């Protein structure tokens, strides 16, 4: 059945793409001519975002996908298999900080280590780490049918232990938090382990640092635009055959672990 789906167009799936950086990644990949599956946990929001991006000329299709809900992940994988027979690009973008609009910028919002609420920490890991493994493993069989599969995990500079422990780094000054930053450190480690397992295959796994972008995630306090933050993921999604795997990159190049 899968052999009967010849499709010369690159097929990409972006999780958490109804808004923010993910929406921009979806739009930029579509502008390159890819067929983009716009993942959204709220199908209504996904349909609206996909329609808006389609209006700019791209082939963007909504896919209901909550990365913490294995049933929706399985359904999305079945849809991709039945419709396209393979997947070329997966961008694991969906992410949460654990803060709410009310707690952002407070101890509770950042989950100060000594006062952490383990339920919040677990929730953040469920989305930012375990969700990535769930989605990646569900789609891996379809990715491995592509001639040049690319997996991008949207991480963060605050996941870099090198930055956080360097007193000269601007990131060293941010208050300690044990949910979001540690989840991105774990995501970086997850990226490396996938790259190690598939080091002899054409598939590439890399982590992207979008920089500090103005989105709902941080109450729009970032100094970069979501479009700027999307660019590094797009670059990693379109790596050539000699491109790296198991790396962590921002716009400037490699980011230290
Ligand atoms: P955002 O505007 O809050 O968007 C986050 C997206 O993830 C939304 O579409 C959200 O869906 C989705 N999402 C959350 N939980 C999900 C789940 N369980 N299943 C599926 N989708 C889910 O944030 P953003 O700034 O664009 O963040 C995108 C990625 O960039 C995240 O991984 C974030 O950690 C990373 N990042 C952001 C910055 C920054 O400065 N903004 C910096 C470094 C890294 P809903 O609309 O349904 O909530």
Image: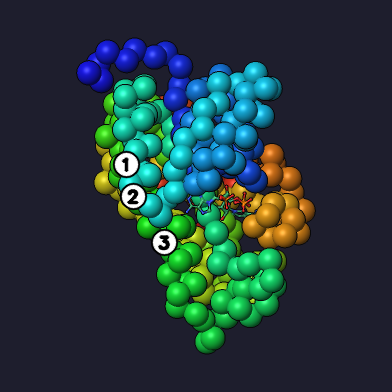
Residue 232 shown left or right of residue 102 in the figure? left
What residue sits 57% from the left and 56% below the top? 156
Look at discs 1 and 3 and give the one toward the viewer: 1
Q: In which quarter of the view is residue 202 placed?
A: top left
Residue labelled with disc 2: 70
Mark number, residue 6: none
Image coords of residue 88 (percent x, y): 40, 28
What residue sits 51% from the left and 32% below the top? 62
Image coords of residue 106 (percent x, y): 68, 77
Residue 76 appears in the rendering: yes
Mark number, residue 126: 3
Q: In this rendered view, identify the residue nearer to me: 130 or 232.
A: 130
Tell me the element at label 1.
helix
Residue 37 shown left or right of residue 2 in the figure? right
Above or below, 83 relative to 192: above
Q: Are marks 1 and 2 in contact (CB under 8 Å)?
A: yes
Tell me the element at label 3.
helix
Q: In this rendered view, identify the residue nearer to me: 88 or 164.
A: 88
Mark 3, Cα crowd under 10 Å, few <14 / some 14-19 / many 20+, is many
* Mark-to-mark CA distance, 1 and 3: 17 Å
What residue sits 55% from the left and 67% below the top? 98
Image coords of residue 135 (percent x, y): 37, 45
Instruction: Answer yes or no: disc 3 within 8 Å of ligand 1.
Output: yes
Q: In which quarter of the view is residue 163 placed?
A: bottom right
What residue sits 68% from the left and 22% below the top? 56
Instruction: Answer yes or no: disc 2 within 8 Å of ligand 1.
Output: no
Q: Where the N terminus falls, by quadrant?
A: top left
Residue labelled with disc 1: 74
């Amino acid at each position: 059945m899968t052999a009967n789906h010849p499709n010369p167009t690159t097929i990409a799936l972006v999780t958490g793409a109804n808004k923010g950086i993910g929406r921009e990644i979806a739009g930029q990949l579509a502008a390159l001519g890819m067929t983009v599956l716009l993942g959204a946990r709220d199908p209504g929001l996904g349909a609206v975002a996909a329609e808006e991006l389609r209006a700019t000329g791209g082939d963007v299709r909504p896919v209901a996908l909550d990365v913490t809900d294995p049933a929706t992940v399985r359904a999305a994988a079945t849809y991709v298999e039945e419709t396209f027979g393979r997947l070329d690009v997966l961008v694991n973008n969906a992410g949460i900080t654990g803060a709410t609009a009310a707690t952002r910028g407070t101890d509770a919002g950042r989950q100060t280590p000594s006062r952490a609420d383990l339920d919040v920490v677990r929730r953040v890991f469920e989305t930012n780490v375990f969700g990535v493994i769930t989605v990646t493993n569900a789609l891996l069989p379809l990715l491995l049918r592509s001639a040049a599969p690319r997996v991008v995990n949207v991480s963060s500079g605050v996941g870099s232990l090198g930055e956080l422990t360097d007193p000269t780094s601007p990131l060293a000054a941010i208050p300690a938090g044990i949910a979001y930053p540690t989840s991105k450190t774990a995501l970086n480690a997850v990226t490396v382990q996938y790259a190690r397992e598939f080091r002899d295959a054409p598939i590439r796994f890399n982590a992207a640092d979008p920089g500090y972008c103005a989105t709902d995630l941080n109450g729009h306090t970032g100094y970069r635009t979501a479009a700027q933050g999307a660019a590094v993921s797009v670059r990693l999604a379109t790596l050539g055959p000699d491109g790296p795997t198991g790396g962590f990159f921002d716009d400037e190049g490699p980011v230290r672990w």
